[in-house]
Image (cartoon, rainbow, N blue to C red):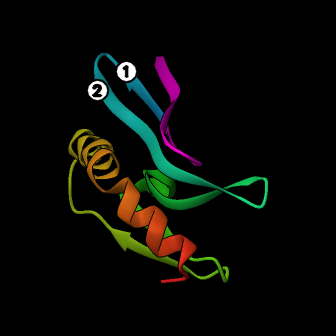
Amino acid sequence: MSVTEYVVPLGENARKRHYHETVKGKVIAFAVQLEVLLAGQWQVVIRYDSAHGFAHIDRYYRGGRQVKREILLKLEEALTLADEDIKENWKSYQEAFLEGK
């Protein structure tokens, strides 16, 4: 099994945390999330992962609400989607989170 994990700064008070596991080149687990620094603590804004046995996205709101949506893709495809979506849309996710939307 091979594990890859890293954190990428995206801008002021925002970062992407990436984690995935592979066996023989096949993704068996992953988590990619956008984190925003708020009141001195990193808060998860959006997370793509394969916990619970399926690919899904969790969207978090400042009031504590969380919305889960299944992603009907193979894990490799969902991992690619996660990386691309956060790379392209992190700023709008950050703004919406901070504005309470």
Residue found at x 66% / y 83%: 63
Number of marks present in the image shown: 2
Was residue 6 drawn as part of the magenta stretch in this picture? yes
Label 1: element kind: strand
Label 2: element kind: strand
Q: Amino acid at mark 1?
A: Val
With respect to residue 66, does 35 lie above or below?
Answer: above
Position of residue 35 measured from the top left corner of the image (x, y, whole percent):
56, 52
Position of residue 47 measured from the top left corner of the image (x, y, whole percent):
47, 56
Q: Is residue 22 visible?
A: yes
Between the C-alphas of marks 1 and 2, the distance is 5 Å
Is residue 37 toward the left or the right of residue 93 in the image? right
Tag on residue 26?
2
Q: Amino acid at mark 2?
A: Lys
For label 1, the crowd category at 10 Å Cα-Cα, with few meaning under 14, some 14 to 19 and many 20 or more, is few
Q: Nearer the viewer, residue 42 or 6?
A: 42
Position of residue 17 measured from the top left corner of the image (x, y, whole percent):
52, 39
Residue found at x 44% / y 28%: 21
Is residue 13 toward the left or the right of residue 9 in the image? right
Tag on residue 77?
none
Extreme residue toward the front, this view: 12
Residue 73, by quadrant, is bottom left
Q: Is residue 60 visible?
A: no
Q: Main secondary structure of the magenta part?
A: strand
Q: Which residues are magenta?
A: 1-17
Residue found at x 55% / y 82%: 100
Q: Nearer the viewer, residue 19 or 27?
A: 19
- Labelled pair 1, 2 in contact (Cβ < 8 Å): yes
Q: Which residue is mark 1?
A: 23
